[in-house]
Image (spheres, helix red, strand yellow):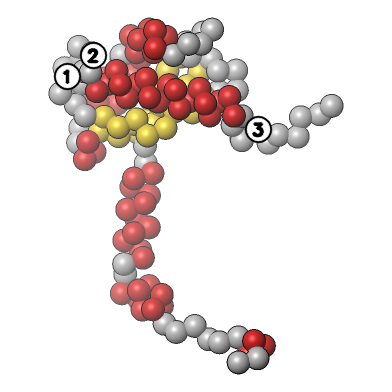
């Protein structure tokens, strides 16, 4: 029987493992276990972890507090990926700990841009305009 699942849709297992990895990474980063100077005092949010279908690779989407020093922190996380993989392996019960990669989470910027657009005077005016009544509703 053919699998009709779209390749871009993660399976329930991928979602579950991704969420476990997200929690583990967040806890490790909150405990400041990394010795990299860029990460010593950094507060980093792990917003999502996407796992490959074979569970061998995971991409963690991160954002430093207020977006400060994001490139330096991202570089430090990439340097620390092997160490983090070992720590995650101790906290998440998987047959094989996935190889970790890190990317900046741009969803915060995207949400801010949408908010800015919605608060433009012309958009607010259009949103507050009375809607035309449907002539077919009998009222």
Mark nearer the N terminus (3 vs 2): 3
**x and y percentages locating residue 126 in the rendered image:** 41, 78
Q: CA distance from mark 3 to mark 1?
A: 38 Å
Mark nearer the N terminus (3 vs 1): 3
Q: Secondary structure at mark 1?
A: loop
Q: Quadrant of the C terminus?
A: bottom right
Q: Residue furthest bottom?
A: 139
Compared to residue 5, the image places residue 96 above or below, namely above
Q: Mark 2: few, some, or many residues within 10 Å (few <14, many ≥20)?
A: some
Compared to residue 113, the image places residue 92 above or below, namely above
Compared to residue 9, the image places residue 102 above or below, namely above
Do labels 1 and 2 touch, CB within 8 Å?
Answer: yes
Give the tally of numbered discs.
3
Q: Secondary structure at mark 3?
A: loop
Q: Is residue 18 left or right of residue 41?
A: right
Image quadrant of residue 116?
bottom left
**x and y percentages locating residue 39 in the rendered image:** 20, 21
The residue indicated by pointer 3 is 7
Image quadrant of residue 27?
top left
Q: Is residue 75 left or right of residue 138?
A: left
Mark nearer the N terminus (1 vs 2): 2
The residue indicated by pointer 1 is 40
Which mark is on residue 55? none
Which mark is on residue 34? 2
Image quadrant of residue 48?
top left
Do labels 3 and 1 touch, CB within 8 Å?
Answer: no
């Amino acid at each position: 029987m053919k699998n009709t699942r779209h390749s871009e849709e993660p399976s329930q297992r991928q979602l579950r493992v991704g969420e476990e990895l997200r929690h583990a990474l967040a806890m490790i980063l909150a405990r400041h276990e990394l010795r990299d100077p860029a990460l010593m005092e950094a507060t980093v949010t792990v917003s999502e972890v996407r796992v490959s279908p074979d569970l061998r690779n995971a991409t963690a989407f991160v954002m430093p507090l207020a977006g400060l020093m994001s490139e330096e922190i991202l570089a430090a996380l990439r340097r620390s990926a092997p160490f983090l993989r070992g720590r995650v392996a101790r906290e998440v019960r998987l047959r094989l700990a996935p190889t970790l990669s890190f990317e900046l989470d741009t969803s915060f910027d995207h949400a801010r841009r949408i908010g800015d657009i919605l608060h433009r005077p012309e958009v607010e005016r259009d949103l507050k305009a009375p809607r035309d009544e449907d002539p077919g509703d009998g009222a």
